[in-house]
Amino acid sequence: MSKIMLNLPEWILANMEAVLQEWEDNAKDLLPDKSASKVERRDHAKAMLVTIVREIERPRAEQQRDGQAATATNPSETSKSAREHGQERRKLGLDIVDLASEFFALRRSVVELWTKGAQELTLPGLNELVLFDQAIDQALLGSIESFTKEKEKQERSFVSMLSESPDPTYLVDVSGRIVFANIATSVLLGKPVEQLPGVALADLWPEAHHDLHSQFETVIEMKKTLRGEVTAGTGSEKHWYEYIYSPVLDARGSVEAVAGVARDITKRRNAELEVWHHANYDLLTDLPNRRLFRDRLDQQTRHSERTGAPFTLLFIDLDNFKEVNDVMGHEAGDQLLKQAAKRILGSVRDEDTVARLSGDEFTVILLDTADLGQIELLAQGIINELAKPYDLGGGTSRISGSIGIARYPQDGDRPDQLLLHADQAMYRAKKNGRNQVHSFTQTPPHHQKPDLPQSVTSA
């Protein structure tokens, strides 16, 4: 290190690397680990030192020219550099405490090295330190002012952006009370935006409280972002929302709030449900189609295997439907099928499944049914309903129905086996004269169909 002279600015420039090394050692204890790299911080510190040196030297030159005492009162260059310094520090992710700590470390580094190398510190030497203190104070104030303005500007822009966002956006403290909410949130919750801060979110959105609260607690405990879906409203007013919960951490790394963003995905969900409905429901009768029927039959069979709960499968075929369709036309045939579907549906319980396999074939899954007498009575009720006249617009028509019965587990414990046996029983009812019910027997007559129709076996 060079010998200390009375001119502090010259000494700083001559010993810049030593000062910066001392600054790094001091800053290591003062500054938290932020995103700014050591190289970036060192370059900023060097730039500020050079600016401060120039600011100290400028009034000294004015003194020599005008014969006045040297003071660091003109903050033009320092202020400009300090403003840039504060803005850069903000962009690097430092907070205002970090900013002040950097300047403190810079001041301490220069003073310690300057005084350590002096045999004695004279009045002119003290004056050099005063000038340095004045310059660094001006730089610190300028940086803080710029830092604060930049932060406020960013916060205003951020709040403005959030406020105008079409998606409900809000901030909730760890007790579940709203800290900030935008206009879209106030519309969702049905409360003026200025009345939302301080109100518990659970009180304003009770139907979603259980799901949201569980996720809310997980975000706080795990300190991680979570996604989910929640519904609000019922019937035609039902809406689906996709939400994201993210933890907001304080300087110690503790969760001080949870930020939430919700997006109305009702149109998307309705479109998905419509596609699913078309794939699983018959377009004419709006009954479950073959695909959904097979899925429910498989599920019910697995459920009964686990629980032992009995169930029954009815296989229904409309008698003489082809004749009506050929004579009165396809439109009349479609009307008959829709009316027949409603009659079958009205003859069973809500928890039972009525499906249209294809053409004039229907099936019914009767849950928790074991008594054959009761099952045959219910099936006969369907026969009676199907035999009533049909108003087909251009006239009336009559048909009948044949029903086969297969019970789980007596008549089969696998889906395909139950379908085969119910179909065989239905075929026996047709052979016996139609318009009747027949239960499956283990010794079917030789003329029963050996295989399931393609409409049943196709997935």
Image: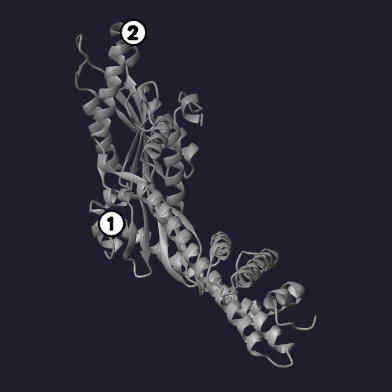
In the rendered structure, the answer to whether residue 293 lies left or right of residue 136 reads left
Percent position of residue 224, x then y: 51, 63
Q: Nearer the viewer, residue 389 or 371?
A: 389
Residue hosting label 2: 326
Relative to 130, residue 258 above or below: above
Q: Residue at x 41, y 66 (%)?
A: 257
Q: Amino acid at mark 2?
A: Asp
Residue 432 can be seen in this image:
no
The picture quadrant where one finds residue 338 is top left
Q: Nearer the viewer, residue 103 or 231?
A: 103
Circle 1 residues within 10 Å: few <14, some 14–19, many ≥20: some
Q: Amino acid at mark 1?
A: Trp
Frontmost of labels 1 and 2 is 1
Circle 2 residues within 10 Å: few <14, some 14–19, many ≥20: few
Q: Nearer the viewer, residue 371 or 327?
A: 327
Percent position of residue 352, x then y: 31, 41
Percent position of residue 134, x then y: 55, 76
Residue hosting label 1: 205
**Secondary element at tag 2:** helix
